[in-house]
Image (tube, rainbow, N blue to C red):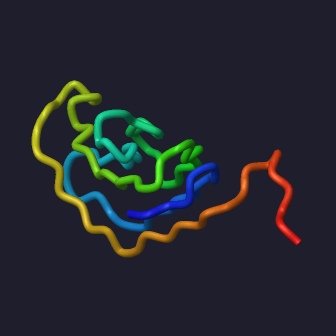
Amino acid sequence: MPVPPGHRMLVRVHGSIIEGRACLGVLDKSLQRWLAAPTPGQSEVSVDIGTNDAVMLAFVNCSASTGKPGRVVFDVHAVSYAIVLPERATPRP
């Protein structure tokens, strides 16, 4: 998804896990580096976009973190996000 470089992105996911464990992460434009690594139990992410002009939200199978690798089944009901200026930035007049 396109994003403005130099900002912060806040993401919130609402859904339900039916089986296994799903995690939310945010990948950089190249899809090679995590800006926010998938973390079990996290439904909100705050990430510095840096120089990226695009990012990808990724839902990852985190079942292996429980010691029981297997499939994951989940429903995403809603995803909301906001793009905000970093704290050190001064808004334009």
What residue is at 29 percent from the left and 51 percent from the top? 59
Residue 39 location, x and y as percent? 42, 37
In the picture as drawn, the residue positioned furthest to the left comes out as 70
Q: Is 18 located above or below residue 25 in the figure? A: below
Q: How many marks?
A: 0
Taking 47 as reference, is 23 left or right?
Answer: left
Q: Residue at x 86, y 56 (%)?
A: 90
In this rendered view, identify the residue nearer to me: 57 or 78. Answer: 57
Residue furthest front in the image: 93
| Quarter of the image where one finds residue 93 | bottom right
Residue placed furthest toward the right: 93
- From the viewer's perspective, is 84 left or right of 5? right
Judge by depth and name the residue closer to the eye, 11 or 84.
84
Judge from the rendering whether residue 39 lies leftward or rightward of residue 47; answer left or right.
left
Q: Quadrant of residue 82?
A: bottom right
Describe residue 10's horizontal placement relative to residue 69 as left or right.
right
Look at 38% across and 63% down and name the residue there: 1
Residue 21, given in percent of the width and then of the height, sits at 27, 45
Q: Which residue is found at the position 21% from the left and 30% from the top?
A: 64
- Horizontal and vertical percent position of residue 67: 22, 25
x, y percentage for residue 51? 53, 44
